[in-house]
């Protein structure tokens, strides 16, 4: 008899979710498997995406060990329709203005998360957010964060995001 561990349970759910995603993408006329690897996100990036769906937690959770997670300011995609490499998209900062972590006029960047590391592009301020050119080498469901650093994406350098961007090349 096999013993299920938390990791084996999570791994089995992951496979099912991938099949669901591939099926839904195919039904929508998109490539079922648009890239060979998934884009890695940190715990805080995942929590930021999930926090939009969390409306409350039971009082009984207070007695359990707390996770040290925090959500970044939310981003929204202000561009609709098919997005391809080379397109300029609007990444919105809904309800707030974003400046560099240093607080001065230092530039901000959009970092597109990939399995091989982030790809940085300039984030050009505009009304309600930033215009960003989608770089080459990205396809499928992708994630972008805004950062004041163009060398690394860490919990300390992320200013906002991630935002989900579906790229169809």
Image (cartoon, rainbow, N blue to C red):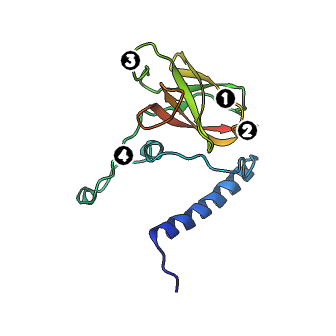
Q: Label 2: how many residues lie within 10 Å, few (<14), some (14-19) or many (20+)?
A: some
Which residue reaches farthest top?
A: 105
User: Circle 1 is placed at which residue position?
Assistant: 134
User: Circle 4 is placed at which residue position?
Assistant: 69
Q: Secondary structure at mark 2?
A: loop
Residue at the image position 65 percent from the left and 39 percent from the top: 166
- Contact (CB < 8 A) between labels 1 and 2? no
Residue 13 is situated, as x and y percent measured from the top left of the image, at 55, 64
Is 151 situated left or right of 55 in this image?
right
User: Circle 2 is placed at which residue position?
Assistant: 168
- Contact (CB < 8 A) between labels 4 and 2? no
Looking at the image, tell me whether mark 2 or mark 3 is earlier in sequence order. 3
Looking at the image, tell me whether mark 4 or mark 2 is earlier in sequence order. 4
Residue at the image position 56 percent from the left and 67 percent from the top: 12
Residue 79 is situated, as x and y percent measured from the top left of the image, at 62, 28
Residue at the image position 66 percent from the left and 60 percent from the top: 19
Looking at the image, tell me whether mark 1 or mark 4 is earlier in sequence order. 4
**Up-down: is 114 above or below 106?**
below
Q: Secondary structure at mark 3?
A: loop
Which callout, 4 or 2, points to the residue nearer the camera?
Answer: 4
Q: CA distance from mark 1 to mark 4?
A: 29 Å
Q: Label 1: how many residues lie within 10 Å, few (<14), some (14-19) or many (20+)?
A: many
Q: Secondary structure at mark 1?
A: loop
Which callout, 2 or 3, points to the residue nearer the camera?
Answer: 3
- The picture quadrant where one finds residue 165 is top right
Which callout, 3 or 1, points to the residue nearer the camera?
Answer: 3
**Up-down: is 155 above or below 79?**
below
Looking at the image, tell me whether mark 3 or mark 1 is earlier in sequence order. 3
């Amino acid at each position: 008899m096999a013993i299920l561990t938390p990791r084996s349970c999570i791994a089995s759910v992951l496979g099912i979710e991938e099949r669901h995603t591939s099926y839904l993408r195919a039904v929508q006329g998109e490539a079922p498997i648009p890239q060979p690897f998934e884009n890695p996100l940190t715990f805080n990036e995942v929590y930021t995406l999930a926090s939009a769906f969390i409306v409350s937690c039971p009082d009984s959770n207070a007695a359990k060990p707390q996770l040290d997670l925090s959500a970044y300011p939310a981003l929204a995609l202000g561009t609709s329709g098919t997005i391809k490499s080379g397109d300029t998209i609007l990444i919105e900062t809904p309800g707030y203005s974003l400046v560099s972590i240093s607080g001065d006029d230092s530039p901000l960047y959009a970092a597109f998360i990939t399995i091989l590391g982030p790809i940085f592009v300039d984030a050009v301020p505009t009304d309600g957010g930033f215009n960003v050119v989608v770089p080459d080498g990205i396809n499928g469901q992708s994630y972008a964060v805004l950062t004041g650093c163009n060398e690394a994406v860490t919990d300390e350098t992320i200013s906002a995001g991630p935002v989900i961007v579906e790229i169809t090349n």
